[in-house]
Image (tube, rainbow, N blue to C red):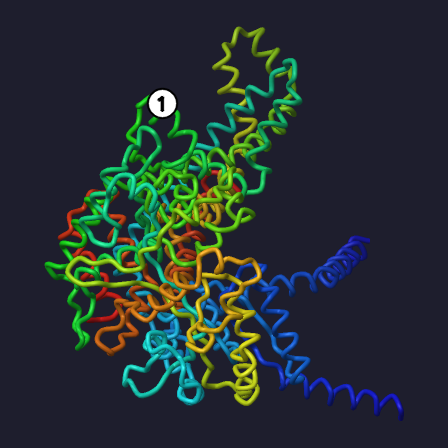
Amino acid sequence: MQQAASSILKKENSLGWKLVSPTVILLMILIIYPVAYNIYISFFDYGITSSTFVGLENYIRVFKDAAFWKSFFITVGFTLMTVIGSILLGLGVALMMNKEFKGRAIVRTIILLPYITPLISIVFSWKYIFDPSYGPFMQLFSQSLGWVSPQLDLLNNSNNAFFVASIFNIWRNFPFVYLMLLSRLQSIPDEYYEAAEIDGATSWNKFTNITLPEIYFVMGAVALMRGIWNFYKFDEVYLISKRAGTLPIFIYERVIGTTSPEYGVAAAIATILMVIMLGLITTYVKKVLKW
Amino acid sequence: MKKRFFVVFLVLMLSVTMTGKLVYWHTQEEESRQQIIAQLIESFTIETGVEVDVVAIEENEMFSKLAAASAADTLPDLIEAGAETILGLGADGLLDTVIPTRFIRNAGDFYTGATRFVITPAGDQYFAIPYHGWVQGIWYRRDWFEEAGLAEPTTWDAIMEAAKYFHDPQNGMYGIVLGKTNDAYAEQVFTIFALSNGARIFDKDGNVVINSPEMREVLQFYKDLGAYSAPGHTYWQQARELYLAGRTPMMFYSTYVMDDLALAEIQTQFISDFDPDLVKNTEFAPMMTNSRPSSFGQVLSLAIVKSSQNKLDVLKLLDFMFEPDNYIKYIHMAPGGMLPTRASIAESEEFLNDPKGIYKSYGAEKIKAIIYGMENIEKFGYVEGRVFPEMGKISGAFTIGNGIVMMFDNNATPDQVLTFWREDIRKLIGR
């Protein structure tokens, strides 16, 4: 009887594999092939008319390149700042929106706007607002009130471009965090809080003992996603300020916006980042998400 | 049987058209220009039966796109690009020199000012055929200058004096708009200052001589002038908008600005009210002088890829594109922006008679003066008839612009910028 059942299971198993195998193979081709090809060209000096095998030279050049390390640490800083910033902001807003009040539905929709508006139009509004010659921000704070120097160029000054790009990223992406956390908050039964109140718990007690444990894993997963996305974030950073100096921009300028593209070096950087990210993600998943 | 015959016939037809297809990459990305190019190419196909694939490429991406195409064995046959790009491709051994050399010599009326930019380092052949060009300089409000009794801004002193006189940031008026970000525009604006002071990147033997007292002077002057310039990391967009809005008396711009100044429908895209007198009150100063006179511009040329299998068809297309009617139609896409590189065209009535009447509003004399300015264009990569393709790499890495940004963002001294430039150039070209 058991044998019969197990053989049915086996059959079902193999049928299942047969059914998903085309998808799996297709995904493998789509993911593994580019990754493998990328690793392959990282050992070559790739020019317009020729490609020569150079072994580990690209890697050695990358590791020796001070500019690479500088932008690597900028990127780490950018990722930490934006992930922590958007989680805190998203959590705060989600906690507020979890309360009943008049007009909550409209406010909830408005909060989503930064995340769902097309990036390009938002970037242009930011650029216009902060433009030092004709932006309303400077008109008000510099020409009318005289609080800031008229020479201040918030978006493009290489000294503060990083902060502006981080703030922009937090502002644009906190609604995503807020949405995820709010949906989890909504599903925490009210009885927990009522029971805690009977035991005389303060708001802070309730937050640390009920809310936080309940949303911990969602928060961890969202932080992981945002971390991966922001580490490789190109479009937002590049559009708001080319001078933010994060790694994706560094790679882009090495390869695309130059008259001597260095594909081999760019591929080496991509491979190095892949290894680092894999290591970080594995540790994170084990330690934080406890899988 | 019939069916099989039909299939064989179809395959044959397909293979004939496949091999006969020309691939043409150009850098005219604006949609209106792409339409005109498409029309021209269509009539070429009707005339000759040769199919052409037209691809618009952003010039900054030309090299990486070509590298990818080269790897995939899908290189174009014909490329339109600026001088530095052409030189870089030529230095990589990608371009055919036989056809352009013969073409230029047969025609006999190309401006030497234009062909200088596509000459091979050996100096006996050409990498491409110059097709059209533009000149850059200072566009200024002649009426304001006359009212204030200021000299025309063609010398360093006059520029500085005028910028100081007009600069009034509290009321939203800026003395001048300089290039202050790390892009091609900043390099262009800086170049004319440098060359007008005899400061160069290469000497005629190819030694890097950027670290010179002349160059330090230029940097210091540029930094001082920056105090009377519109704030922030300005580039061509702010220059155009502030000038059209009457908030600066001087801007650096190429001749591409001519239609913005003359046509209401274009001007009102950037500002609310059209100023019909702006054309009359605007004067163009293509030359700048400090220790010597200099002018700056760009020439776009047509280059043939060496490995092309369709050279005969490419020749047909070149002949077609240089036929006066087609040529004039092409350069009328951007009156002022696209100036002819051949004397016979520049002097023809048809050329001065563009559909929107822009050349008429400036007058033939002014246009001829501007085209004459093209003859005297100078660039860092060309010294006394010698050509240095390495300049393409320096421009591509925005080295000059990065140094300028250091000066304005971090208050770097001219010496610090020179040190940075020297190091960066060594990294890029290995000397």
- Viewer-nearest residue: B267 or A145: B267
Q: Chain of mark 1?
A: A
Label 1: element kind: helix
Q: Disc 1 marks which residue?
A: A144
User: Which residue shows up at 44% across the image and 54% down it?
Assistant: B257
Can residue B122 be seen from the camera position used here?
yes
Q: Where B176 falls versus B343 (above or below)?
A: above
Q: Quadrant of the N terminus of chain B?
A: bottom right
Q: Please state the horizontal and vertical placement of residue B354, each as a whole percent of the image.
A: 54, 63
Q: Please state the horizontal and vertical placement of residue A104, each as a whole percent of the image.
A: 64, 19
Q: Classify residue B390 by image quadrant.
A: bottom left
Can residue A40 be seen from the camera position used here?
no
Q: Please state the horizontal and vertical placement of residue B17, each as a whole percent of the image.
A: 68, 84
Q: Classify residue A168 by image quadrant.
A: top left
- On screen, residue B303 versus residue A265, left or right, reads right
- On screen, residue B200 versus residue B173, left or right, reads left
